[in-house]
């Protein structure tokens, strides 16, 4: 299970804008919300993972960060960072 000491979560420090853009545009690779941006997945899904354990690796770290963002009501800030992809 991942711990809350992710290097990209700098409590009290200015967050890395590039990391926030990456987080906003990260796509869930499996499960009920496969293909969805992490920021668009409901909070209850992250709460369940918080209780059961987040996946290892980058995905788990991103999900843990998104959990913290959602429980603090800050997900609206990331929604603005989703890159608009045009279907041509």
Image (cartoon, rainbow, N blue to C red):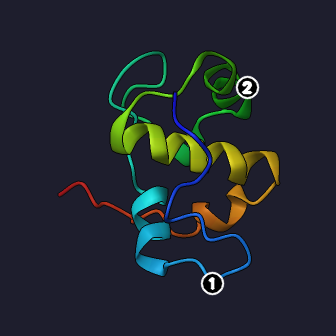
Q: Which mark is residue 14?
A: 1
Q: Position of residue 67 (x, y in %)?
A: 66, 42
Q: Position of residue 74 (x, y in %)?
A: 75, 60
Query: How many numbered marks appear?
Result: 2
Residue in the picture at 61% in, 15% down: 52
Q: Position of residue 12 (x, y in %)?
A: 74, 77
Q: Position of residue 23 (x, y in %)?
A: 46, 57
Based on the displayed image, in which of its 4 quarters is residue 22 positioned? bottom left
Is 16 left, or right, of 43 in this rendering?
left
**In the image as oriented, which residue stretches furthest toward the right?**
72
Q: Quadrant of the C terminus?
A: bottom left
Residue in the picture at 58% in, 41% down: 3
Please tell me how crowded label 1 is: few (under 14), some (14-19), or many (20+) other residues with Cα within 10 Å: few
Secondary element at tag 1: loop
Secondary element at tag 2: helix
Q: Is residue 24 above or below residue 45?
A: below
In-front residue for pair 12/39 = 12
Q: Can residue 37 be spotted in the picture? A: no
Is 47 left, or right, of 79 in this rendering?
right
Is 62 left, or right, of 26 in this rendering?
right
Q: Which residue is mark 2?
A: 44
């Amino acid at each position: 299970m991942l711990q809350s000491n992710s290097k990209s979560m700098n409590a009290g420090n200015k967050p890395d804008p590039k990391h926030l853009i990456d987080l906003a545009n990260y796509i869930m690779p499996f499960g009920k919300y496969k293909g969805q941006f992490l920021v668009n997945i409901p909070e209850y899904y992250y709460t369940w993972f918080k209780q059961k354990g987040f996946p290892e690796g980058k995905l788990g770290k991103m999900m843990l960060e998104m959990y913290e963002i959602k429980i603090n009501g800050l997900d609206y800030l990331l929604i603005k960072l989703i890159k608009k992809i045009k279907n041509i």
